[in-house]
Image (cartoon, rainbow, N blue to C red):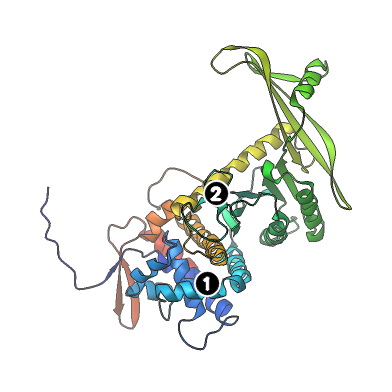
Amino acid sequence: MTDFVIKQLPYDLSHQAGLALIGKYLKRINLNALVDRAFPVRSGVANSDIFKSYLGLLCLGKNDFDAIEGQRKDAFFTRALGLRAVPSSPTLRQRMDSHAASWFDLVDNINAAVLGMKIGGKPVDFGVLPCGYVPLDIDTFAMDNSGTAKEHVGRTYAGVDGYCPLAAYLGTQGFCLELALRPGTQHSASETEYNIERVLPLAAKLTASRIGDQAATPLLFRADSGFDSAKLMCAIGHHASALAREIAFIIKWNPRSTPVESLAQAKVADTGAAWEMLREGKRQCVWSETVQARHGEQCLAVRRIYRLTERTIDKRGQQMLLPEYALEGWSTTLPETFEAPQVIALYADHGTHEQFHSEFKTDMDLVRLPSGKFDTNSLVCALAAVAMNLLRLVGQHTLHEPDSPVRHAAQRRRIRTVMHELMFKAARMVHHARQWVLGLGANDTAFAVFERHWRALDSA
């Protein structure tokens, strides 16, 4: 073991050099103009500095307002994000508390600007499914805020006290269109038509680019059985017509009070039913029918695919006294060219969004929200969606290159990987010859992709 001499160097080092890229993105969308023109201040810290400071914290995996105190004397944090002043913890909290409700639309505009930018002349690659559709996945997840008296904390479906935000992800790469905070007791489908009203036009706009005579990429809305509602299906159909876009959906069917045993016996007795043997003692039957989703005066024809599974031998090889039946279903407006197994496989791929939930909850540490006020926590979630998209863009343009830090092959990188490889990077900031230099180490394996992406942002 080597005995080191520990000493303090006569110059400043930063352990979060990746914030320079975040600051570059915020400069590209001209966040100062977006915020300060709409919400100017006469004195004190500008509101744009409030936004940039908190987004900087979120990109480092911190959401506590007190975390800003550790950045107030950091010259790099100030210069990297283009701040005129770093707010104190009370200022950050009070400003977000007082303006939260009026800033919701502003944050939506910021998120749309981030997702709509072009880098190197190319728009954001959201990722397209092999079938040619861009997925739009929505779902709720539980945030455990047990033991607190925060506003609208309630018992969630996960059995903990907290919140159940609704997240909407566009594409296969996990870009977040919206992270809408909800009370813990709110049902998944309740008021979701308002979320659809916001995210569908945005998704259509972001994927509306045309190449020559090629039509805009169609969208595929996917949701689980908590959203099995004729009202939501009709809302999707209405927006598809209003936007003049192909927007299909796959929503898991909720059997509710369907008599599974009676239906199973009828299907077993049907000599025309096609059964597929999966293994000894387990077989399944798949069929479909057209149903009408009605809400008010609206009516939408929907193809419903059913899958009935019969088990006479359990997974341990034990013979059952009576057959066991499980009935599943999926409602879809995909064309008939998509056969039942393909529709079921497309819905199964919807499960990928659970990884995106995990990135919010673990990588960004967004579980216990920092405020006791619901509106402020809603603003925190909205800004967290922006921060996730910024980190996703950094990862998309740096960690897939041949000279990127060594990683296993993957279509995308987790937010945690982006933080470890790009955000938490040691660097020295030097002021020389009227220039500010950000010096990375000679042994930095990510220098090439870092510097190349910086130049791409600088010249775009």
Q: Identify the image quadrant of residue 446.
A: bottom left
Q: Is residue 459 visible?
A: no
Residue at mark 1 to residue at mark 2: CA–CA distance:
23 Å
Q: In the figure, 378 relative to 337: above or below?
A: below
Q: Nearer the viewer, residue 271 or 264?
A: 264
Rendered image: mark on residue 81: none
Rendered location of residue 455, percent (x, y): 45, 68
Three-letter residue code for mark 1:
Asp
At a point 39% along the width and 67% down the height, the residue shown is: 66
Q: Nearer the viewer, residue 129 or 47?
A: 47
In the shown orientation, is residue 104 left or right of residue 72? right
At a point 60% along the width and 56% down the height, the residue shown is: 183
Q: Which residue is mark 1?
A: 97
* Mark 1, other Cα within 10 Å: few <14 / some 14–19 / many ≥20: some
* Mark 2, other Cα within 10 Å: few <14 / some 14–19 / many ≥20: many
| Labels 1 and 2: the sequence-earlier one | 1
**Secondary structure of the residue carrying numbered label 2:** loop
Q: Identify the image quadrant of residue 238.
A: bottom right
Q: Which residue is mark 2?
A: 142
In the shown orientation, is residue 270 left or right of residue 104? right
Q: Nearer the viewer, residue 241 or 323?
A: 323
Residue furthest bottom as drawn: 42
At a point 70% along the width and 52% down the height, the residue shown is: 190
